[in-house]
């Protein structure tokens, strides 16, 4: 087994080896740009790690890992267009650096490129990977649409929100891990369990991201703290606060998320106060723990030696122990 940093280096090196600039440059240069912005590359790392967990050389999983990374970045390019976002990882977004049409077309090309990376596998493995990838890609699109729909609804339920973040975020984490198991030709049971591990960890990760968006350290969070509050996003924090609030608190919170804020800082402070006093913050932290524990429960069912289970547990602990 290797360290997370080593896996990240292997992904970066493989990406670099595949990065031959082609024509037309206005199609491929934006792709090189977004992939070159880096990030933690957690999803491809999970593909490599899972392959080795199931006794297969990580190198065999590199094409699938890169497929996951390219698809993830494709979704970011199009998400940024939908959100009219000016920055991604602290740098200018593709559609801002070039233009809207370039962002759409380069994103489309990235989706096709992602599929092409599976072509290096034998037909049996290719079919399994492509089937999982197609299902996951469609779920991500469905999750994104629900996220958009929820912006104009005031009746979003907790189950609906959890389904949205499952599709938008967690399924790709789960699929990344299952791809490693497929490449290693692990048992169906282990492949299912590693998927469930990734799904629950992905849910916990997204809920934690919601929490840190409001309560993270501005110095280390990597994006504006309170961004979801400014954008009036009805996150798990908001929904739980509305559930637990008094009638007066709920009315104030709804007003804060409806009326344009003259003083953004004051709005963020007021909303966070309601999140805390209502019990919404505590409920969110408890949900993060619950999904993390669900992920760890699947480890006990896997046909793996204890050392390999500890690698996965340590990864989960490290991921969920972040403060920003």
Image: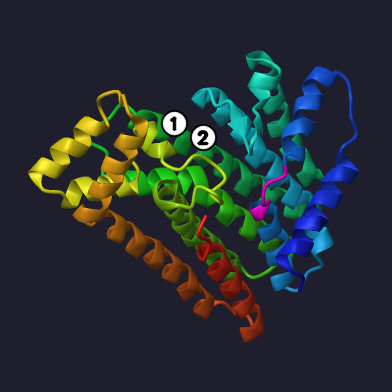
Residue 287, picture quadrant: bottom left
Residue at x-position 32% and y-position 49%: 237
Q: Which structural element holds mark 2?
A: helix
Question: Along the horizontal axis of the image, is 143 left or right of 8?
Answer: left
| Circle 2 Cα neighbour tier, 10 Å, few/some/many (<14 / 14–19 / ≥20) | some
Q: Is residue 233 visible?
A: no
Residue numbers of the magenta segment: 38-42
Q: In the rendered image, which residue does mark 2 sit on?
A: 141
Query: Residue 54: x, y in percent?
Result: 70, 72
Q: Nearer the viewer, residue 107 or 253?
A: 253
Magenta stretch: includes residue 282: no
| Circle 1 Cα neighbour tier, 10 Å, few/some/many (<14 / 14–19 / ≥20) | few
Query: Residue 154: x, y in percent?
Result: 24, 32
Q: For the N terminus, give its image quadrant.
A: bottom right
Q: In the rendered image, which residue does mark 1 sit on?
A: 145
Query: Residue 102: x, y in percent?
Result: 70, 17
Q: Which structural element holds mark 1?
A: helix
Figure coloring: rainbow
Q: Is residue 45 above or below residue 98?
A: below
Residue 234, picture quadrant: top left
Q: Main secondary structure of the magenta part?
A: loop
Residue at x-position 67% and y-position 47%: 39
Residue at x-position 79% and y-position 33%: 32
Q: Is residue 168 visible?
A: yes
């Amino acid at each position: 087994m290797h360290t997370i940093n080593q896996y990240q280096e292997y992904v970066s090196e493989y990406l670099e080896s595949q990065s031959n600039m082609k024509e037309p440059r206005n199609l491929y240069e934006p792709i090189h740009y977004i992939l070159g912005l880096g990030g933690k590359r957690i999803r491809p790392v999970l593909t490599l790690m899972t392959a080795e967990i199931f006794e297969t050389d990580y190198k065999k999983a590199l094409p699938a890992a890169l497929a996951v990374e390219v698809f993830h970045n494709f979704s970011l390019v199009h998400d940024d267009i939908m959100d009219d976002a000016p920055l991604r990882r602290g740098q200018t977004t593709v559609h801002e650096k070039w233009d809207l049409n370039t962002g759409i077309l380069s994103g489309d090309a990235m989706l096709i490129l992602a599929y092409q990376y599976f072509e290096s596998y034998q037909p049996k493995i290719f079919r399994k990977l492509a089937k999982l990838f197609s299902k996951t890609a469609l779920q991500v699109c469905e999750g994104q649409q629900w996220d958009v729909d929820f912006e104009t609804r005031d009746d979003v339920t907790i189950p609906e929100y959890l389904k949205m973040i499952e599709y938008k975020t967690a399924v790709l984490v789960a699929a990344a891990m299952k791809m490693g198991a497929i490449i290693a030709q692990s048992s169906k049971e282990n492949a299912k369990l590693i998927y469930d591990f990734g799904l629950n960890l992905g849910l916990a990760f997204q809920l934690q991201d919601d929490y840190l968006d409001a309560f993270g350290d501005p110095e280390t969070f990597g994006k504006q703290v309170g961004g979801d509050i400014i954008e009036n996003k009805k996150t798990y924090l908001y929904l739980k606060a509305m559930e637990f609030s008094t009638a007066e608190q709920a009315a104030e919170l709804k007003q804060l998320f409806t009326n344009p804020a003259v003083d953004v800082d004051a709005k963020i402070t007021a909303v966070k106060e309601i999140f805390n006093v209502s019990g919404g913050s505590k409920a969110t932290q408890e949900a993060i723990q619950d999904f993390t524990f669900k992920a760890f429960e699947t480890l006990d069912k896997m046909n793996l030696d204890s050392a390999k289970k500890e690698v996965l547990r340590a990864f989960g602990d490290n991921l969920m122990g972040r403060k920003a």
